[in-house]
Image: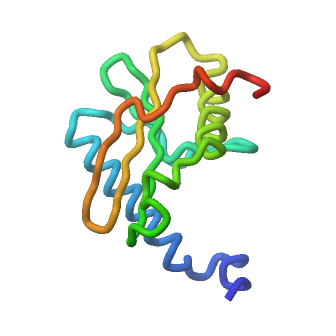
Amino acid sequence: MWLRRVIGAKPDNTTARGREAESQAARYLESQGLRVLERNFRVRGGEIDLICRDGATLVFVEVRQRTRGDFGGAAASVTAAKQRRIILAARHYLAGRPDSPCRFDCILQDGERLEWLRDAFTADRYRSGN
């Protein structure tokens, strides 16, 4: 099984479901007036699922999907460690770009239910080096 993933033959079900969740989230946000700028922005130590523009504001979006509500569902999976990794990637993305207001949103999918949390968390509590 792991060999197929290594050589890239077929994505596993989790990967495929994650990609579909991100595509659904992007379509939803676009229907709400946001413009998707990038998908799966990666740097060493962090990743951002979607980077969008909402007017003048840059929006860093974490997409979390859970088929079951065990362990708190999708919202509970956006841990402090996950937030730090998203903020790290956002700082890399913002480096060298003109100052722009930004926020961190989450799209949570629990089963068929989709929830958009605007300003789900802030970077204030995670200063550089913490």
For image coordinates 37% across by 48% down, the residue present is: 107
Total of numbered circles in the picture? 0
Q: Against 32, is 3 above or below?
A: below
Considering the image in quadrants, where does the C terminus appear?
top right
- Which residue is pictured at 65% across the width and 17% down the height? 96
Q: Nearer the viewer, residue 63 or 2?
A: 63
What colour scheme was applied to this rendering of the protein?
rainbow
Quarter-wise, where is residue 17 in the image? bottom left
Q: Position of residue 99 (x, y in %)?
A: 53, 10
Instruction: In the rendered view, tell whether residue 102 sits above or below residue 89.
Output: above
Q: Residue 94 occupies which quadrant of the picture? A: top right
Q: Which quadrant would the N terminus be assigned to in this image?
A: bottom right
In the figure, is residue 32 to the left or right of 121? Answer: left
Query: Which residue is located at x 50 percent, y 47 percent?
Result: 49
Which one is in front, 96 or 46?
46
Q: Does residue 126 appear left or right of residue 62 in this picture?
A: right
Q: Position of residue 24 (x, y in %)?
A: 31, 57
Q: Residue furthest top?
A: 99
Is residue 81 found left or right of 49 in the rendered image? right
Residue nearest the observer in this picture, 118 or 17: 118
Which residue does the image show at 51% across and 73% down from the upper left?
14
Relative to 59, does residue 112 appear above or below in the rendering? below
Q: Position of residue 123 (x, y in %)?
A: 58, 25
- Taking the view exactly as shown, the residue that stands out farthest to the right is 129
Q: What x and y, as percent, mark residue 121?
A: 48, 32
Residue, far front: 71
